[in-house]
Image: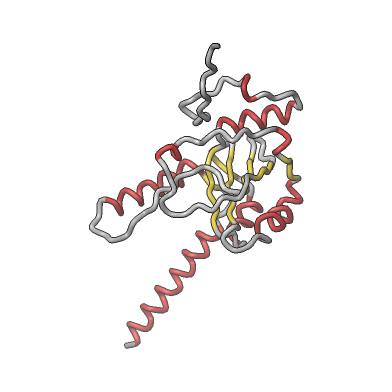
Amino acid sequence: MKKILTGLILCFLILNCSKKESHDKTDTYIISYEDKKLQKYSDSVANSNSNLVVIPNRGFYSECQLIIDKKGAFYFYQKDYFMRICGNHSKSDTLPHFLDLKPKDIVRIPEKSLNDFLSENILNKESGRRVLTIASQSDTIKNTSFLNFINKNKIDTYLIRRTTQEEDTVLKYKKKDTSYYSEDIKWDQNRIQLPFIKPKLDH
């Protein structure tokens, strides 16, 4: 009995140490690594006889988007709130759709104000709307205070991904403070789903 009790205590201590170690490792987040890890888990579940179902992470946007540029600066923009329910995904969700985003829609957030800004604009929302999409221009996010904020606060859901072509383009024009016209951009249709525009008919 004493051996069993000692074994249980030892397992408990090892488990606590590993939990603490993994919890403290919030100094970097590598998007490609985490995506591969999730895909590997999803594939292993699909190939097993388990009753578990891994819902594919489709869609690129939520109501609130936080952009992290290559220098680690923070920007924010919002979309109209849309309640997404099971079954309303489509195959086109594998490509980001065109938002018609404008430079004026994106606001710069000073890093020292980031936690307060996110608390005010995300955590104060009703339950079910505390959702944040984090889009980074770099594959690795190194901002420790930001990652700790995400881990320690009650954001219902967050998605971390790379920035879309539209976000990169509009952000570039915002930084340059020059006129932006989406129709003048040569969009790569392998990277963005453009709206269908009916051709003009000759009279």
Q: Nearer the viewer, residue 124 or 9?
A: 124
Quadrant of the image containing the N terminus: bottom left
Q: Nearer the viewer, residue 102 or 140?
A: 102
Left or right of 200 in this view: 106: right
In the image, residue 159 above or below residue 169: below
The residue drawn where x is 59% and y is 57% is 129
Left or right of 167 in this view: 50: left
The residue drawn where x is 53% and y is 15% is 201
Instruction: Identify the residue at the far left of this view.
Output: 49
Position of residue 123 measured from the top left corner of the image (x, y, whole percent): 66, 60
The residue drawn where x is 27% and y is 60% is 50
In the image, residue 3 above or below residue 171: below
Quadrant of the image containing the C terminus: top right
Instruction: Identify the residue at the far front of this view.
Output: 203
Q: Nearer the viewer, residue 129 or 31?
A: 129
Left or right of 29 in this view: 92: left
Position of residue 177 measured from the top left corner of the image (x, y, whole percent): 76, 27
Q: How many marks?
A: 0
Position of residue 132 measured from the top left corner of the image (x, y, whole percent): 59, 51
The residue drawn where x is 35% and y is 50% is 42
